[in-house]
Image (cartoon, coloured by chain):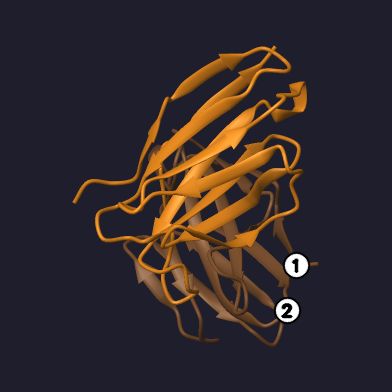
């Protein structure tokens, strides 16, 4: 059965800090890994990673995939209070239509 | 472009009743996936529809069912509600449901079963 594990489960930092969130996976026939941010209701899409070693970047957020280690990291630099959210990692197996397997999420709290 | 919409946003039902939730995908998206989110289990995949056909199903009992219409709108139904069905139900759409495309989520329907 496919499995995604995120760490840490929760993290409290102060504005301006840099954080690194981790995601490891076990999935049959891996095709892609996705990161989402969930604030109140709907998870919003951040990144989709399919190739190992290629960093994806959007503003202060960046992410990279390591297929050899079966893992990914999400970095957030110069954190702001608006970054407070649950960050979800999900994997998509290549043989399964429309199905994402999610990790339990990392709750990030950024204090002013 | 309008996002994924779900109705209703909140529902309170009694054990034993049934409920129908609705999801309208982003215009042009033909794949709709449904997920259940609970504090204990996180986000779990229910099923996926494409061109009115269920292509994939998660590990949920038969009380959970769904359908998709020709305009790609989708509904999910839960019969004989149990207390454990209380959850946030999310739908997500993508152009065709393959792993090439990311999924975009709606705001969810919060179901409370009493």
Q: Nearer the viewer, residue B28 or B108?
A: B28
Q: Is residue A69 above or below residue A47?
A: below
Q: Residue furthest right?
A: A1
Which quadrant is home to the C terminus of chain B? top right
Quick check: can you spot residue A14?
no
Task: Give coordinates of residue A10: x percent, y percent.
Answer: 67, 43
* Residue with the mark numbered 1: A2
Is residue B31 visible in this depiction of the protein? yes
The reply to whether dot 1 and dot 2 touch (C-beta < 8 Å) is yes
Residue closest to the eye, B68 or A34: B68
Q: Chain of mark 2?
A: A
Residue A83 placed where, x, y %? 43, 44
SS for dot 2: loop
Q: CA distance from mark 1 to mark 2?
A: 7 Å
Q: Mark 1 falls on what kind of element?
A: loop
Q: Is residue A57 left or right of residue A86?
A: left
Badge 2: few (under 14), some or many (20 or more) residues near its Cα, within 10 Å? Answer: some
Tell me which residue sits at (34%, 45%) in the image.
B4
Give me the residue at 63% from left, 30% from top: B87
Q: Position of residue A98 (x, y in %)?
A: 53, 64
The tag on residue A28 is: 2
Q: Is residue B8 above or below residue A8?
A: above
The chain whose colour is orange is: B
Which shade is chain A?
Answer: brown
Q: Based on the displayed image, in which of its 4 quarters is residue B48 positioned? A: bottom right
């Amino acid at each position: 059965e496919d499995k995604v594990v995120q760490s840490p489960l929760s993290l409290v930092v102060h504005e301006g800090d840099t954080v690194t969130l981790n995601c490891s996976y076990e999935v049959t026939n891996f095709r892609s890994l996705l990161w989402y941010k969930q604030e109140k209701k709907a998870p919003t899409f951040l990144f989709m990673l399919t190739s190992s070693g290629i960093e994806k970047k959007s503003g202060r957020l960046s992410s990279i995939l390591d297929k050899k280690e079966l893992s990914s990291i999400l970095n957030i630099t110069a954190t702001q209070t608006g970054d407070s959210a649950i960050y979800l990692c999900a994997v998509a197996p290549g043989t399964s239509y429309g199905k994402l397997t999610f990790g339990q999420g990392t709750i990030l709290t950024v204090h002013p | 472009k309008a996002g994924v919409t779900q109705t209703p946003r909140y529902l309170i039902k009694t054990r034993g009743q049934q409920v129908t939730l609705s999801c309208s995908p982003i215009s042009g998206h033909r794949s709709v996936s449904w997920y259940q989110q609970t504090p204990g289990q996180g986000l779990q995949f229910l099923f996926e529809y494409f061109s009115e056909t269920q292509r994939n199903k998660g590990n949920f009992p038969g009380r959970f069912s769904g359908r998709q219409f020709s305009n790609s709108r989708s509904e999910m139904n839960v019969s004989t509600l149990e207390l454990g069905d209380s959850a946030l139900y999310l739908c997500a759409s993508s152009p065709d449901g393959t792993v090439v495309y990311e999924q975009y989520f709606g705001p969810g329907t919060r179901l409370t079963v009493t």
